[in-house]
Image: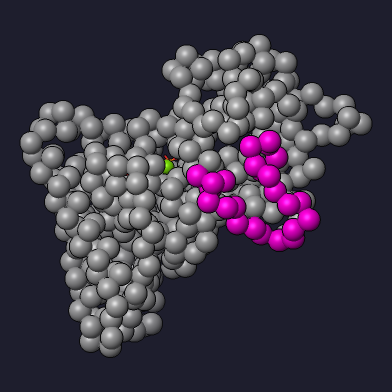
Amino acid sequence: MEVRARAPGKIILAGEHAVVHGSTAVAASIDLYTYVSLRFPTPEDNDDTLKLQLKDMALEFSWPVGKIKAALPELGSHAASSPTSCSPDTIKSIAALVEEHNIPEAETGLAAGVSAFLWLYTSIQGYKPAKVVVTSELPLGSGLGSSAAFCVSLSAALLALSDAVNLDFGQQGWLMFGESELELVNKWAFGGEKIIHGKPSGIDNTVSTYGNMIKFRSGDLTRIKSNMPLKMLITNTKVGRNTKALVASVSERKVRHPDAMIAVFTAVDSISNELASIIQCPASDDLVITEKEEKLEELMEMNQGLLQCMGVSHASIETVLRTTLKYKLGSKLTGAGGGGCVLTLLPSLLSGTVVDKVIAELESCGFTCMIAGIGGNGLEVCLGGSS
Ligand SMILES: Nc1ncnc2c1ncn2[C@@H]1O[C@H](COP(=O)(O)OP(=O)(O)OP(=O)(O)O)[C@@H](O)[C@H]1O
Ligand SMILES: C[C@@](O)(CCO)CC(=O)[O-]
Ligand SMILES: [Mg+2]
């Protein structure tokens, strides 16, 4: 029996980092996905291992299930219907299982993802042998929510073949889960994100699970519907960084300057709320759309200024900002910052020639640019493996 799941990456239009401290943020899914396939061996296969294949990186990890059982005895009896978080002791035992594999030096960040895999797999499926294959269209560690898309697609595949979820295996093609299944996936994925991010707000796994566009605050999501064309250029500075370290650095700054940082987070909250209401408000003609776009651009620039105050910008991000400003375009980092990706609003009346020029100039700096579709479906599953 085989199941496939796919979950999208995301952009954060406003509110990253501040959302970890209780402010509102606005995020949308993008049409780049992480795919997970899960297959249990047949008795004839005579295979007693759990295998994780990370296809894009040409890496394969494998553990005898008896070894996992001996190392993680506390996980096997957990109910898939009761999502939980990984305890610090279990994280240590999992890290020992991961360390047995030599992860290439350039990919050390992967250890956290492999740990999240072992925890989610064992907590949901116990000590069964299986083969899990992962591929992704998302750049890893670049602010587009690769960790959340990984945790969401993995949790969904694992739950689809568990007794916590009842699916009709007669159905063909990509299917959406019902509300209660989505909630279950989202909670498990949040547990996985905690292993990768340390202290996630939950916005990335939530937008990857539900798709579309959401407003998110203190664990609560409000689905929002855009009433205007939203075209964003995404520039990947290709400067690697790690969300866990950046989230921790903002918390440390908050400890050093609590009053100032709380004021910054409050300002971000207002920006996110205003941005969400502009996006949702119906526009009647081009003039109104232009005004709305100008306001959005300004709010994005203000948010970027506050992200600089939080200490999460980077020289490469500043280069993108300077370059796009030459063309009178507003930009902000998206995701955790410190490198990674930058969003630039492309107003609806902007000519294609200008867009081509900006892209050419950004790419001449060594960055890569793309225009992704925004606000599509969230998590989907495909039973039987094909499609
Ligand atoms: N397809 C994948 N396979 C294995 N591990 C993955 C995969 N995608 C993400 N990860 C894990 O997530 C880590 C990257 O997560 P991180 O949160 O730092 O960046 P991001 O999620 O891409 O950006 P952001 O959190 O800012 O949106 C990787 O180093 C790896 O551990
Ligand atoms: C930086 C952050 O706000 C967004 C990362 O995409 C972290 C989080 O909310 O978990
Ligand atoms: Mg992440």
Residue under the image location 29 percent in, 31 percent down: 248
Q: Main secondary structure of the magenta part?
A: loop
For residue 375, above or below residue 107: below
Colour logic: one colour
Please state the horizontal and vertical placement of residue 18, each as a whole percent of the image: 24, 44
Q: Report the side of 98 relative to 327 (left or right).
A: right
- Residue 375's image quarter? bottom left
**Residue 10 included in the magenta stretch of the image:** no
Can you tell which quarter of the image residue 240 is in?
Answer: top left
In the image, residue 59 above or below residue 70: below
Residue at image position (54%, 15%) is: 93
Visible residue check, residue 272: yes
The quadrant in which the N terminus is found is top right
Q: Position of residue 95 (x, y in %)?
A: 52, 20
Report the front residue among 103 and 18.
18
Name the residue rendered at 87%, 26% in the picture.
46
**Magenta span covers which residues?**
160-183
